[in-house]
Image (tube, helix red, strand yellow):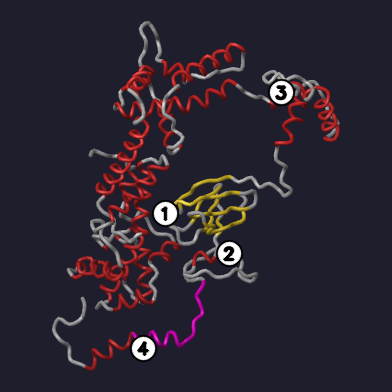
Amino acid sequence: MPVGFLTDSQTREYGRFAGEPTPDQLARYFHLDDTDRAFVAEHRGDHNRLGVAVQLGSLRFLGTLLEDPAVAPVSAVRFAADQLSITGSAELLTVYAKSAGRWRHGPRIRERYGYRAFADFGIAFRLNRFLYALCWTGADRPSALFDRAVAWLLEAKVLLPGLSVLERAVARVRTRANSHLHRLLIEAMTPEQRASLDELVAVPDGGRQSPLDRLRDGPYIQSGREISRALTRLEEIRVITNGLPQTDRLPPGKIVALARFAAAAKAQAVARLPNDRRAATLLAFVRTLEATAGDDVKVERPFRYIREDFFLGRSFRNMEDLNAQLIDWLDTVANVRVHGTTQRVVAEAFAEEQEELQRLPEHRFNAVLKLERRVSHDGLVAVGGNYYSVPDRTRRIVEIEQLPDLVRIIDRGIVVAEHPVLEGRRQYRIDRRHRTGRPQPRTPDRPMTMLGRIGDHVPLRSLTVYEAIGASLAKPVLSACRRPAVEGEGRP
C-alpha cells in the first residue's frame, strides 16, 4: 500500500531525540527511583550502569532503545550520571557504546519493566481498534492519527515498530473506516438515485458549469433577486434529495467532512472518484446542502436593522438617554410593526410565544469555550498563548473548557486540572501536585507555584532511609570480598 502522509518533522523525530530534553522531561523520564537504582546496580562497571540508566530513560521517553547510545543528549547523560554519582560520563558512555555487552541490556530492560514488541499477540488488534474508533467518530488527518498511535504505544509500553510499519497501519485502518462509511451511505440507494447524483458532476450539453457548481453557489447579497434565486435553489435541492437515504444515524463529523470535500473540490475531481466514494460524497453533500440552503433563504438582520433604523440620525447625551430613546423606539416602532416574513405584529407574536420560553437562570451564565489540545512532553497544554500543567497525560488529547476566569482540563469525562486564567502570553501555570508521584491535598500553605530547576526542591527523609539504602548496596560488595572470584561471574 503506497502511503506517504508524514511530515518531515515526524519522519525526522520518530524514535529519536529532537534536541535536548527540558528539565521537566528529564525529571519525568530519566529520574531513577529505588527500583531503578537496584536494577542498574546489578550491572558491573560504571560504564554499564550509566549506559543502562540512559537506555532506560530513552525507552520511557522515545518508546524505543537507542541503537547508538553515544547519540544520547548530553543533558540526559549528565542527569543520569549525577544520580549514580558517576564522573566522566561522556567518556564512559563512549566506552559503553563500543562494548558488546550492551546488546544484552535491551532484553533485560524489556523483561524487567514489562515492555512488549509490536508483533506480540493482540498488540496490533488493540491499536487498530483504537485507531478505528478515532477514524469513525472524527475526521483527523492521517498525520494526526499517526501521533495518536505513537502516544498510544508509549502509554501501553509497546516498543515502537518501524516507521513504515506504523504508517501503513494507520493508512490501512483509515481506509477501512472510510470504506465502511461509504458502504453504509450507499447500501439503500437505487441505481436510479446513483445515476441522478452522478448527473450533478456532469456539464449538460450547451452549458458552462455542472449542477454541482451551480448549487453550491449561494446568494451573495440580500436583494429580492438573490432571495428569489435562493428559493429556486432550495426547491431544486429538495427535488434531488427526495427519496435519498438519511444520514442522521452516521457520525456527523464524517458526513460534514465528505460534504466539505464536495463543496471545495472541482466537479471533475469529484467525478474521478471511485464509484462508491463518489456516490457517498455526493449524498453527504446534498443532505448537508439541504440544511444550509434553508438558512440562505431566511436571513435575519437584527443588528443591521437596529443600526440603520434606530442609531442613524440620533444623538445621545449619555447612556441613560440612549436607553430611554431605545425603549421608546421599541414601544412605538420596532415591536408594533408587522414582520415582513411572518406577517405578524412582533409584540403579539412574542406575547403568544412567551409561555413556551424558558426563564433566564438566576445565577450568572458562564460562557464556555470548548477546545481540544494535546498534552506536550512537558505535561502542559497551550490555551490562549499560555501554558497550564496536566498530571501524567503526556501526548494525550484532552478537552479544554475555558471560562472567563477559569481553565478546566477534562480527560475522558473527568476533570483532571483547573487553573485560573493567566493574563498576557507565554505565561506558565504549574500545579506542584502535577509534578509529584502521588496527589497531595491543597492547603493554604501549599499554593500553586512555578516549578523551579531540578534540585531546587529536595524532599526531607529520615536518615534511617539512607542507612538502609547504603546497607542494601553494601551487601553485594561485602559478599564479593569474602569469597574468591569465579570466572564469568557477575553481569557485564
Which residue is painted at 25% across and 77% down in the image?
Answer: 43
How far is the residue under mark 1 from the one under mark 4? 40 Å
Front residue of 97/167: it is 167
Using residue 262 as the reference point, say whether residue 404 is left or right of it.
right
Determine whether the residue tagged by mark 4 lies in a helix, strand or loop.
Answer: helix
| x, y percent for residue 488 | 15, 81
Earlier-in-chain disc, 4 versus 2: 2
Q: Which residue is mark 3?
A: 305
Q: Which residue is mark 4?
A: 471
**From where the camera sits, is residue 168 visible?**
yes
Q: Residue type at mark 2: give it.
A: Thr
Check if mark 1's residue and mark 3's residue have beta carbons within 8 Å.
no
Q: Which residue is mark 1?
A: 395
Magenta residues (range)? 457-472
- Between disc 1 and disc 4, the foreground one is 1
Above or below, comparing residue 91 to residue 219 in the picture:
below
| x, y percent for residue 491 | 21, 78
Where residue 303 sits, quadrant-wise, is top right
Quarter holding the N terminus is: top left
Earlier-in-chain disc, 2 versus 3: 3
Earlier-in-chain disc, 1 versus 3: 3
How far is the residue under mark 2 from the one under mark 3? 51 Å
Q: Residue type at mark 3: give it.
A: Tyr
Above or below, comparing residue 259 to residue 449 in the picture:
above
Q: Residue type at mark 4: give it.
A: Ala
Check if mark 1's residue and mark 4's residue have beta carbons within 8 Å.
no
Above or below, comparing residue 284 to residue 177 in the picture:
above
Which residue is painted at 52% across and 46% down in the image?
Answer: 371
Which residue is painted at 44% across and 32% down in the image?
Answer: 247
How far is the residue under mark 3 from the one under mark 4? 85 Å
- Between disc 2 and disc 3, the foreground one is 3
Q: Which residue is mark 2?
A: 449
